[in-house]
Amino acid sequence: MKTVKIGSVGLGRLGHEHAKNLATQVPGCELAAICDVDADRVKEVAEELGVQYTYTDFEEMCRNPELDAIVIVSPSFLHCQQIEIAMNNGKHVFCEKPLGTDVEQCKAAEKVIEAHPDLIFQLGFMRRFDKSYAEAKRKIDNGDIGKVVLVRSYTQDPRSTIESTLKFAPHSGGQYLDMCVHDIDLIRWFTGSNVKNVWAIGGVFEFDLYKELNDADNAAATIQMENGAMGFMFTNRTHAAGSNVETEIIGTHGTLRIANVGAKNLLNIVDEHGSREEYYPDFMSRWHEAFVAEMVAFTGHVRDNTKPADLTVYDGTAVSEAAYRCKESFETGKMLPIR
Ligand SMILES: NC(=O)c1ccc[n+]([C@@H]2O[C@H](COP(=O)([O-])OP(=O)(O)OC[C@H]3O[C@@H](n4cnc5c(N)ncnc54)[C@H](O)[C@@H]3O)[C@@H](O)[C@H]2O)c1
């Protein structure tokens, strides 16, 4: 089996998780290079994971002829320009969500990817690689619940990680582009349709930084799909008990629920507070297996020269566009069509 050599950029919250997974949990792959503008961080992670090549300049890393592929885990506004640099240097690309923070960036990325049909591109919608979500999709495609009528999707981050969340907020693109892109991706994937109209509402219930950013710490949106199906999503940064993501898919012949997924395991604890299950403390632990699975899939595509069948750059653009319209709807208070 050919070893796929990877260079990874961005060594922050998720960048470190991806780097660790690539170095230790993805068979047939070598984390050969890492890059971050923070030189101390690069040195620290290189020592921890035994990485051969280190960079503070992204383009320089992309020029390394030994690398097969680049994994992009930098701030969201850099994604599209880094996709272009990596592909122009002949590298396959895995890029974290969102594809871009505005639609123009996404359209430009489409052109770059179209200009390199020999290179593989995969986007970081890791929920699709979670066993429960993948099984739900199989059942829907099999017709088990008839026509999908409504998808309800909640993404709640815990209060306990608010410090790093607030630090990340100014360059996140806002709640809709940062958090809701996952829910919009699921709604499109499960309904098999594109977004037609959005109406987004929300507010700042606790963390004033979001007021300064013209954003919300609790936000919701109602979505109408082109095929008539409906979506509802809710996101917040103030969940009391760890990371909670729950999804319900209502069909004409049945309902699928990926509920109570915040529960860490099947342990039931009974004590002086009553009866309870513990939640995953943060998104990293909730999605750990999915983060590994998406990298196994990506390196497999690079090795076998195959492309992800239904996770394309166009999904990235469509999701970012819908998320951006949600942001505009939130700001104007109006229901808006996708242009
Ligand atoms: N799939 C998911 O659920 C999920 C979860 C969290 C974050 N993300 C995405 O991952 C990306 C990174 O998020 P994060 O939480 O790790 O952010 P972060 O702020 O913790 O880390 C970003 C890192 O990028 C580095 N960086 C900034 N500019 C750079 C440049 N020009 N070249 C090289 N390095 C640079 C910073 O020094 C920092 O170490 C974002 O796009 C985010 O949307 C996805």
Image (cartoon, rainbow, N blue to C red):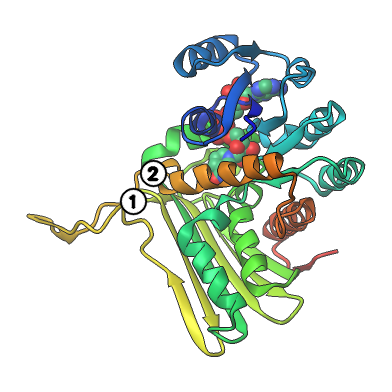
Secondary structure of residue under mark 2: helix
Where in the image, quadrant-wise, is ligand 1 located?
top right
In the picture, the disc for residue 240 is 1
**What residue is drawn where x is 50% and y is 37%?**
165
**What residue is drawn where x is 65% and y is 27%?**
6
Specify whether 228 is left or right of 34.
right
Residue 271 lies, in percent from the top left, at 8, 55
Residue 134 lies, in percent from the top left, at 53, 63
Secondary structure of residue under mark 1: loop
Position of residue 118 relative to residue 12, above or below, is below
**What residue is drawn where x is 45% and y is 54%?**
156
Q: Residue 71 occupies which quadrant of the picture?
A: top right
Q: Residue 229 occupies which quadrant of the picture?
A: bottom right
Please state, as top left, top right, bottom left or bottom right, where the C terminus lies in the image.
bottom right
The amino acid at mark 2 is Arg
**What residue is drawn where x is 59% and y is 79%?**
142
